[in-house]
Amino acid sequence: MASEMMEALLALAQEKNIDELYMLDRLETSLAKSYQNILNLEWDCRVIIDRETGHIYVYEMVPKGERDPETGEYSEYEEVDVTPKDVSRIAAQNAKSVINSIVREAGRENIYHEFADRVGELVTGTVLQTTPDFTILKIRDGVEAELPHFDTRRNPGERNERPAGEYYQHNRRLQALIIEVRDPANMKTNSRGESARPSIVVSRTHPDLIRRLFEVEIPEVYDGAVEIKSIAREPGGRAKVAVSSREPNLDPVGACVGPRGSRIRMVVSELRGERVDVIQWSDDPARYIANALSPAKVTSVSVDEETHYATVIVPDDMLSLAIGKEGQNARLAARLTGWHIDIKSASLMVGIPEDADMLIDDDDDLLGPDAETEERCEFVDADGNRCRNHARPGSRFCGVHEAEEL
């Protein structure tokens, strides 16, 4: 019986890639605690497992001499053999839980060493189980990941990495981003059941999830011809992605959208319908801010480099589109650009600031190189709104309204 148990232990150690001596040492330590309670020993107990035959010996460590006056500990012990007759049966009962614990810890160690350097990568898994607090994904045999979606109001120390409105069915394939791999050596004791939860933590709300999906679906992004400059996202609702091209003849927005939107459609499908706006990045802050407010048309942008504050003027009929539902479009544009953006309608502006960077639909003919020194067009429409263009030289009106007045 003893030899059979030893053979089984060694075979399990090889199968799970666990050090044999480490497993036997752990088993001896656990058995010593069990036998001390079972035999009701007065002193500590020591267990030795013969590495060849598998026989188990139990010794009580009876102290000899006097205690150390400083430490209160004994320096010498006598090993008294107290091995019970049914030692193998007791060992077999205790070994099961010990071995399971060792195998579980060894598996977590192997997963940690394999995935610790893969934080930020995209992984595909199958939904195994969904609870009110988290979803378990199967990455492959023996490797699972946790997608937490705790109620952070009731559990302030936990995460919520699930976009609003997403629910996962059993056996459904899901792509997610690795955001953490728990180290078994530094496992938190205050986290809810963390020791029994998977080591890998993934997210569906992280902005880099969109970056990785772009790399999968768009070859130009994967090759580096198109660079993703910035991402702003409200998971489950809408996202904005600023892209630029490293090749002069390549349209970065068109490359990301694809023919008839085929490429971006694949990204949106994986994000469960989350709207993704791809905009052109620019090193000119005014142009970049105007692009970020797409699909709204922008009349002018005035930027203050010192305060990092931008004032944007839009036509009256574009005001609601520029701001977006509950301010979503303006909020995402501010996150994308990193600027504080103030959006105002044209009818509320008495005049255009002198330092404004004009972006009037790229109609450069309406604003000549000396536009700052020219006077403003005097045309006023039926609603009392004055024209925002500058007057032509020698005239009180711009080129659009001069013919009407004549």
Image (cartoon, helix red, strand yellow):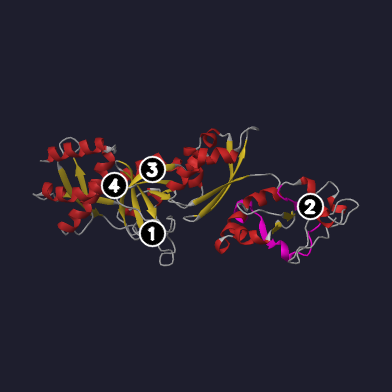
| Residue assigned mark 1 | 191
| Residue assigned mark 3 | 124
Residue at point 75% right, 65% down? Answer: 382
Residue 344 appears in the picture as rendered: yes
Q: Is residue 147 magenta?
A: no
Q: Quadrant of the C terminus?
A: bottom right
Say which label, 4 or 1, has the lower sequence index: 4
10 Å crowding of disc 2: few (<14), some (14-19), many (20+)? some
Residue 126 vs residue 47, the one in the foreground: 126
| Residue assigned mark 2 | 400
Tag nearer the camera, 1 or 3:
3
Residue at point 26% right, 49% down? Answer: 101
* SS of the residue under disc 4: helix
- In the image, taking residue 274 as reference, residue 330 lies left or right, namely right
Say which label, 2 or 1, has the lower sequence index: 1
Residue 194 appears in the picture as rendered: no
Tag nearer the camera, 4 or 2:
2
Q: CA distance from mark 3 to mark 4?
A: 23 Å
Residue 15 vs residue 215, the one in the foreground: 215
Q: Are marks 4 and 1 in contact (CB under 8 Å)?
A: no
Residue 12 vs residue 333, the one in the foreground: 333
Residue type marked 4:
Arg
Tag nearer the camera, 3 or 4:
3
Q: Quadrant of the N terminus?
A: top left
Tell me which segment is drawn in magenta: 334-361
